[in-house]
Image: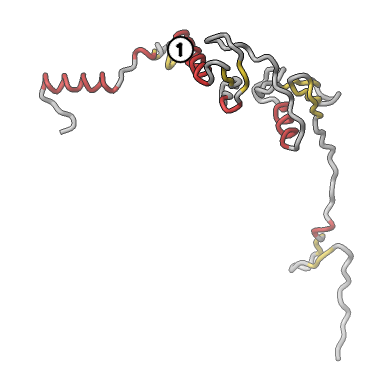
Amino acid sequence: MKTELAPSRTAGTVRSSQGIPKAHASAMIREDFMVFTPSVSIQGYQYLVDFGSGSVHRFHRVNKNKECSCGAAYCEAIDAVRFYLQAGGARAPDPEGMPPCPICGNKTFRDRNWDGKYTKELGWRCTKGGLRHFLDAKAERIKKNLAENPWLIPPAPGYPGVRRDELMTWEECEAISRKVFLETGYDPTA
């Protein structure tokens, strides 16, 4: 029986096909980074987010409409509150004393099912008129906004813009097409 010396291997290396020792996967260098997570607490009806003394703007207040006191639309404090709530953190209380119904003046109560997804407005119901008063008030607000801003595409330098009242309905377009057909005998669908 022939015996030969086996090549010695240092701990933590594996021999590759080229014969060059490589480090084992478990022997990799590990660096520890300090990851600062902001602290979130409840202050009144809002969340107080503390980014620590090293931050330029240390304290941020985030309300229940996902708006930050700094005014930035995409603030890190909003994400910090979201992570805090997903981790099981306590919710801030709802503001007490909902405003009275703008239709009849009776008391209102919160209805989370009708919170505005894009407008971030709180949903509510009236004790007398129920959901109908909420929807009526919302329709009035939309009509007012449309009257104040008649532009579908606002004017820009060198472009006159497009107003909502300049658009034609399909009924108006059909009437014009019928008139052209009767006057000229041309039918574009034939």
Q: Is residue 27 above or below residue 45?
A: below
Q: Is residue 94 above or below residue 22?
A: above
Q: Is residue 100 visible?
A: yes
| Residue 18 placement: quadrant | bottom right
Residue type of the residue flagged with mark 1: Lys
- Left/right of residue 135 with respect to residue 35 in the rendered view: left
Q: Residue at x 58, y 22 (%)?
A: 123
Residue that label 1 marks:
143
In the depicted view, which residue is nearer to us: 185 or 138?
Answer: 138
| Residue 16 placement: quadrant | bottom right
Q: Is residue 156 visible?
A: no
Q: Residue at x 65, y 22 (%)?
A: 65
In the depicted view, which residue is nearer to us: 1 or 171?
Answer: 171
Coloring scheme used: secondary structure
Q: Position of residue 177 (x, y in %)?
A: 20, 22
- SS assignment at label 1: helix
Q: Looking at this rendering, what residue extends furthest in the bottom direction?
A: 1
